[in-house]
Image: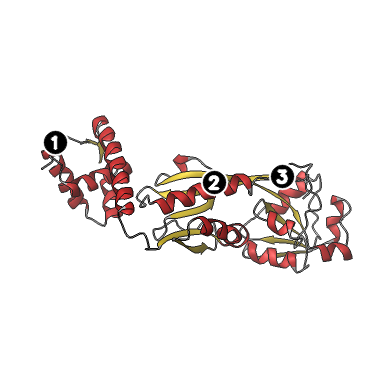
């Protein structure tokens, strides 16, 4: 028999070292603080050395423990991969993806067939968040959010940058036939459509266009951007929309961007993978596919390009 440490204690130790907190480890593993402490004590007894030291009110992993935890984590990843390879090949894998509604409708879902063609054994279950501020709770394997790709801002997740985003003016072709936009100042003849979830879009765009906001300008505000987008498509007014999320709509002629050189830089999108997610081949394949799609299909055209 190999001289293996107690595996349950190893599992608790890896989470505690990764999260840096007995309380967070307990929440992730659904254990009490005392149960986490007891399992750490079991492992410390087996190893014959302390793994955590008290600093103030917190238990902090020692340098040796952090190095050990990294090795344990990699071993768990290899074990998970080996178990999957040894499993039933005909079993479909369910991958739970949580995204904002607009991103799901305009970018992710239209592309999913390309992923399914390479991994027919994976069922991608998409759930949506109505705002970018919806809490990042469990129930997903990967989440996609608009935000900076800084690891410190997402401490519980591995962060993968997908693409940057810019805002530009959008309108329906039919509306512009009736009421042209020959120059930026012509926006004063239109109804400005905006969203509560994207405040300040018109202020920023008008500033970049060298225009001032007029007090008497006709406006309509909707609660979510996907509602605003539909109002733009229906010709109820003009709006500010993100590229490359809406690039397919532009390519299909559903909307046009009459002033592509006037654009406002915005925070891009990131993929967030919980550190405790099962690192299956389905998950890693999906992440690789997302990055490839973002690089090849999601890049932002230069201002001189036709939009």
Q: Residues within 10 Å of mark 3 (few under 14, many from 20)?
A: few
Local SS, label 3 = loop
The span from disc 3 to disc 1 (Cα, nearest Å) is 57 Å
Q: Nearer the viewer, residue 193 or 104?
A: 104
Report whether 162 appears left or right of 285: right
Residue 245: % across, % down: 64, 54
Local SS, label 2 = helix
Contact between marks 1 and 2 (CB within 8 A): the answer is: no
Residue 302, quarter of picture: top right
Q: Nearer the viewer, residue 304 or 291?
A: 291
Q: Nearer the viewer, residue 133 or 57?
A: 133
Q: Which residue is mark 1?
A: 47
Residue 17: % across, % down: 28, 41
Contact between marks 3 and 1 (CB within 8 A): the answer is: no
- Whether residue 37 appears in this view of the structure is no
Q: In this rendering, which labeled residue sits more in front, label 1 or label 2?
A: 2
Q: Which residue is mark 2?
A: 291
Residue 180, quarter of picture: bottom right
Q: Which residue is mark 3?
A: 301
- State the scheme by which the image is colored: secondary structure
Q: Residues within 10 Å of mark 1 (few under 14, many from 20)?
A: few
The span from disc 2 to disc 3 (Cα, nearest Å) is 17 Å
């Amino acid at each position: 028999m190999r001289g293996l440490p107690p595996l349950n204690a190893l599992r608790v130790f890896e989470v505690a070292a990764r999260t840096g907190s007995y309380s967070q480890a307990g929440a992730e593993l659904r254990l009490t603080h005392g149960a986490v402490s007891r399992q750490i004590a079991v492992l410390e007894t087996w190893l014959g050395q302390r793994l955590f030291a008290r600093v103030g009110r917190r238990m902090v992993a020692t340098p040796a423990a952090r190095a050990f935890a990294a090795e344990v984590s990699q071993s768990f990843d290899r074990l998970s991969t080996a178990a999957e390879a040894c499993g039933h090949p005909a079993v479909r894998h369910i991958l739970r993806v949580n995204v904002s509604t607009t991103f799901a409708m305009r970018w992710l879902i239209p592309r999913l067939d390309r992923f399914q063609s390479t991994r027919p054994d994976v069922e991608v279950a998409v759930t949506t968040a109505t705002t970018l501020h919806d809490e990042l709770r469990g129930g997903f394997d990967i989440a996609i959010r608009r935000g900076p790709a800084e690891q410190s801002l997402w401490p519980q997740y591995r962060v993968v940058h997908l693409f940057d985003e810019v805002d530009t003016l959008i309108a329906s072709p039919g509306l512009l036939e009736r009421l042209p936009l020959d120059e930026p100042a012509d926006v004063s003849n239109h109804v400005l459509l905006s969203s509560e979830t994207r405040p300040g879009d018109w202020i920023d765009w008008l500033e970049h266009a060298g225009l001032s906001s007029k007090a008497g300008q006709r406006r309509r505000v909707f609660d979510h951007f996907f509602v605003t987008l539909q109002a733009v498509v229906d010709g109820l007014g003009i709006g500010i929309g993100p590229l490359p999320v809406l690039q397919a709509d532009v390519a299909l002629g559903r909307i046009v961007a009459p002033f592509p050189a006037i654009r406002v830089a915005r925070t891009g999108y990131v993929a967030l993978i919980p550190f405790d997610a099962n690192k299956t081949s389905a998950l890693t394949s999906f992440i690789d596919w997302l990055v490839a799609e973002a690089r090849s299909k999601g890049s932002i055209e230069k201002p001189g390009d036709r939009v």
